[in-house]
Image (cartoon, helix red, strand yellow):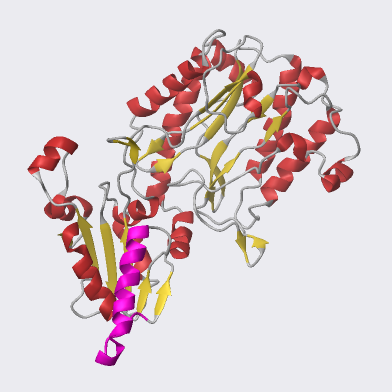
């Protein structure tokens, strides 16, 4: 898969081009403790290398410079005793499928040789400060020697837009990994839906989720993003992560959580009654959100614009708010005045992949881009009624409901990657009662 990704990028290069990519480094958490390492998404996409401080150089049509070379940390028994095993050049050749691998101490010399011979340099300014400084120094040095016949690359091309668009269209291998991430995530949601009881604390539910993610193959920490476990009115805080409050029997619990599997993210949200039964008011609001989600998923077809789904969800949610007598006026008037936005707050979808909010443009030439086969997006409408909003009838205050699934656009419609967790009202109650 990673070799295919490099070959695809290689087709975008011209003879005389050099592209340089830097992997991630360890980041200090506090004092001498690092955060758990996570590779840069685009570097992982091109290399499959899980180690820190690696580099990749691609060259096309340049005599004496290898078409691709990966630079990794050297084998070092002492460092490996303290910090873990390293691939080393031989291991990288064997396990990652590269023809040429060097230790990263050789990177600066090899990159200097490649850049000196390049007509165009692919480099994403701002992605890595140390690499920025290195490239700037080489180019400045070459310009100072122009009278000696040396020349800096004539053009610097940002590789990020090209790699981002490549990453937006998922290959079958990537969909397989995303299905695995979604399966683990859906099963975890189903488990906690069954295990949640009044009187528990939100962090107990968070711990169940993270245990399930990690125990079933979730990468690194197991999760793709910090889990949101929001009971009652906490659900009205969109990125609530304190996860420390008691769960009340009459409240709903909103869980927004997803596993990461071999670098790929799932992103699922479910909202369910802590005591196992929706109240009449909760049912009414929940059904509106569910109807909006189902209508939007139905719209996830090749050729439909990305933002058309949000428009569809907005219409369903606005009509529901009118029916609940929370907003006044007819549908067209409410949509024009955007009175519904106070209660819907966020957009309905985003791209999903190696990053939870994955890369890829949402507009092409100023217009919402059409959906294509291979794209994966979330569909996550919601309604939120602040506990302090006295303009809302009292029975609705403090209710926050979001329902989110991961949708793969195919040539024959949409595939819901995360369909393994219940969301219909009766099915949710049955899962809570198991």
The region drawn magenta spans 129-153
**228 or 314: nearer the eye?**
228
- The percent coordinates of residue 182 (x first, y second) are 45, 35
Residue 200 higher or lower than 422, as above or below: above
Extreme-right residue of the structure: 329
**420 or 22: nearer the eye?**
22
Q: What residue is at 66 percent from the left and 47 percent from the top?
A: 299
Q: Is residue 17 visible?
A: no
Task: Tell me, yes or no, whether the highlighted magenta stretch contains residue 338.
Answer: no
- The percent coordinates of residue 124 (x first, y second) are 41, 64
Q: Main secondary structure of the magenta part?
A: helix
Marks counted in the figure total: 0
Kindly indicate the quadrant of the structure image that contains residue 109. Answer: bottom left
- The percent coordinates of residue 369 (x first, y second) are 62, 59
Residue 272 higher or lower than 116, as above or below: above
Q: Is residue 87 visible?
A: yes
- The percent coordinates of residue 152 (x first, y second) are 33, 81
Q: What residue is at 45 percent from the left and 25 percent from the top?
A: 187
Task: Tell me, yes or no, whether the highlighted magenta stretch contains residue 135.
Answer: yes
């Amino acid at each position: 898969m990673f070799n295919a990704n490099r070959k695809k990028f290689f087709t975008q290069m011209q003879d005389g081009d050099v592209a340089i990519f830097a992997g991630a480094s360890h980041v200090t958490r506090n004092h001498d403790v690092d955060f758990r390492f996570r590779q840069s998404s685009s570097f992982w996409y091109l290399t499959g290398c899980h180690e820190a401080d690696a580099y990749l150089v691609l060259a096309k049509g340049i005599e004496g410079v290898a078409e691709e070379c990966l630079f990794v940390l050297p084998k070092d028994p002492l460092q490996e005793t303290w910090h873990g095993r390293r691939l080393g050049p031989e291991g990288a050749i064997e396990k990652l499928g590269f023809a040429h691998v060097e230790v990263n101490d050789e990177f600066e010399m090899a990159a200097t040789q490649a850049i000196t011979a390049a007509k165009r340099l692919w480099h994403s300014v701002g992605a890595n400060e140390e690499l920025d400084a290195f490239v700037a120094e080489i180019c400045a040095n070459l310009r100072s020697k122009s009278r000696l016949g040396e020349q800096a690359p004539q053009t610097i091309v940002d590789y990020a837009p090209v790699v981002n668009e490549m990453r937006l269209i998922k290959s079958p291998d990537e969909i397989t990994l995303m299905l695995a991430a979604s399966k683990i995530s859906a099963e975890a949601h189903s488990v906690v839906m069954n295990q949640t009881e009044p009187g528990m604390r939100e962090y107990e539910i968070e711990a169940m989720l993270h245990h399930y993610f990690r125990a079933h193959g979730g990468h690194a920490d197991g999760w793709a993003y910090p889990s949101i476990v929001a009971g009652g009115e906490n659900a009205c805080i969109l990125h609530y992560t304190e996860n420390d409050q008691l769960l009340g029997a009459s409240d709903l619990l909103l869980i927004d959580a997803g596993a990461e599997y071999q670098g790929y993210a799932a992103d699922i949200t479910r909202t369910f009654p802590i005591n196992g039964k929706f109240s009449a008011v909760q049912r009414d609001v929940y059904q509106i959100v569910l109807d909006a989600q189902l209508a939007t998923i139905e719209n996830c077809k090749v050729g439909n614009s990305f933002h058309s789904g949000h428009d569809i969800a907005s219409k369903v949610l606005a009509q529901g708010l009118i029916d609940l007598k929370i907003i006044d006026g007819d549908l067209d008037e409410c949509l024009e005045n955007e009175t519904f936005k106070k209660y819907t707050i966020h957009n309905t979808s985003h791209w999903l992949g190696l990053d939870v909010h994955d890369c890829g443009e949402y507009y092409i030439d100023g217009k919402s881009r059409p959906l294509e086969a291979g794209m994966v997006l979330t569909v996550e409408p919601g309604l939120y009624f602040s506990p302090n909003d006295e303009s809302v009838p009292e029975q609705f205050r403090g209710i926050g409901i979001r329902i989110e699934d991961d949708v793969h656009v195919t040539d024959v419609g949409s595939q819901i990657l995360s369909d393994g967790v219940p969301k219909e009202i009766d099915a949710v109650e049955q899962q809570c009662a198991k």
